[in-house]
Image (cartoon, grey):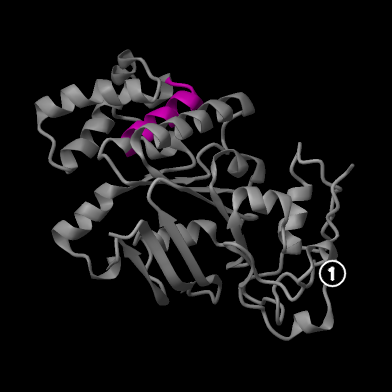
Amino acid sequence: MTDILLEAQGITKTFGNGVRAVNNVDLTVSRGETLGIVGESGCGKSTTIKVVLRLLQPDSGRVFFEDEDIARLRGRGLKEFRRRVQVVPQNPQTSLNPRLTLFDSLAFNLRAHGHTRSQRRQRIPDLLDRVGLDPVYADRYPHQMSGGQLQRAAIARALATEPDVVICDEAVSALDKSVQAQILNLLSDLRRDLGLAFVFISHDLAVVQHVSDRVAVMYLGRIVEQAPATDLWSNAYHPYTSALLSATPGLGRERIVLEGELPSPTAPPSGCGFRTRCPVSVAECAELWPDLRARAAQHLASCVHRDPAELMSPAVG
């Protein structure tokens, strides 16, 4: 059996208003790894994940789970896919039913996947303990818990079905920095202890750096760079990635200020979509959006430039 659990091949999604939210995106998620997906708001991160989860149908392209096309899943097969791929949403205050206690919210997910009443009563305290919540929280309602406690509860709900992949969609963006660190450490512990694979979506590179093995950088519906995390931090090949890194505190980068606004996805510029804001744009950039090309081992970038020194992101010495 392949180590790849989830794979997206050339997925494209256009909405009725003409917005091409995702454009020819390829992604893989292997067993036990964390893939980070970063980019500005509106770049297509969440739409990509909705297609991967089969919450949206792509215009073209396919998504595979353990080599099986998820578009063909029906009945029991689709239910099993839902069990094995779970989501931790951005805002647990809206994803948890305010009329249900935490116990009932967790029990609902367990009951949907065949757990008996006695199994639910036995498993829920274990789930709460796993995410660092005292079992007394089982009887509390969402309004009786803090933001960090609610996010731990959302993680417990995702773990209830014993998934293989957990997708975190901006899962710490609504939390303050100290609580963010606690939740990120929890996710790292869960990955180590349970062998989980994660997809971690964020606009914050510093957060992604903390948890990811590989990172995909998205801009205007496309992946513009993809690489092992450590390689990306030290040697970004795309000017957009360089700009994101330069704005990340603690990395010691000279700040690259991008001029202009993010182009409208309804009327993107010709050629490379980043060229209207790119500090190293050349005439060739207006002709065609470059394909992702290998620049180093497992390091792909979509840029006409080959020398990372051209990308004007020197470290501050």
Of the residues shown, which amino acid type is indicated by label 1? Val
What main secondary structure does the magenta stretch of the protein show? helix
Give the side of residue 39 with respect to residue 139, left or right: right
Provide the residue span drawn in magenta. Answer: 145-158
Can the viewer see residue 258 in this picture? yes
| Label 1 crowd (10 A; few <14 / some 14-19 / many >=20) | few
Residue that numbered label 1 is attached to: 280
Residue at the extreme right: 317
Q: Residue at x 84, y 55 (%)?
A: 257
Q: Position of residue 50 (x, y in %)?
A: 42, 59
Image quadrant of residue 93? Answer: top left
Residue at the extreme front: 297
Please check the rendered image and state whether residue 232 is part of the magenta-colored stretch, yes or no: no
Quadrant for the C terminus in the image: top right
Instruction: Out of 235 and 10, give the one closest to the viewer.
Output: 235
Q: Position of residue 170 (x, y in %)?
A: 53, 44
Q: Residue at x 81, y 41 (%)?
A: 252
Element type at marker 1?
Answer: loop
Can the viewer see residue 101 in this picture? no
Instruction: Out of 242 and 168, give the one closest to the viewer.
Output: 242
In the picture shown, does residue 296 fall above or below 158?
Answer: below
Q: Residue at x 39, y 34 (%)?
A: 155
Q: Position of residue 147 (x, y in %)?
A: 50, 27
Q: Position of residue 173 (x, y in %)?
A: 58, 39
Quadrant for the N terminus in the image: bottom left
Instruction: Out of 133 and 31, give the one closest to the viewer.
Output: 31
Give the side of residue 277 with respect to residue 264, left or right: right
In the picture shown, does residue 317 fall above or below 22?
Answer: above
Image quadrant of residue 166? Answer: top left
Give the side of residue 179 with respect to residue 118, left or right: right
Give the side of residue 53 with respect to residue 260, left or right: left
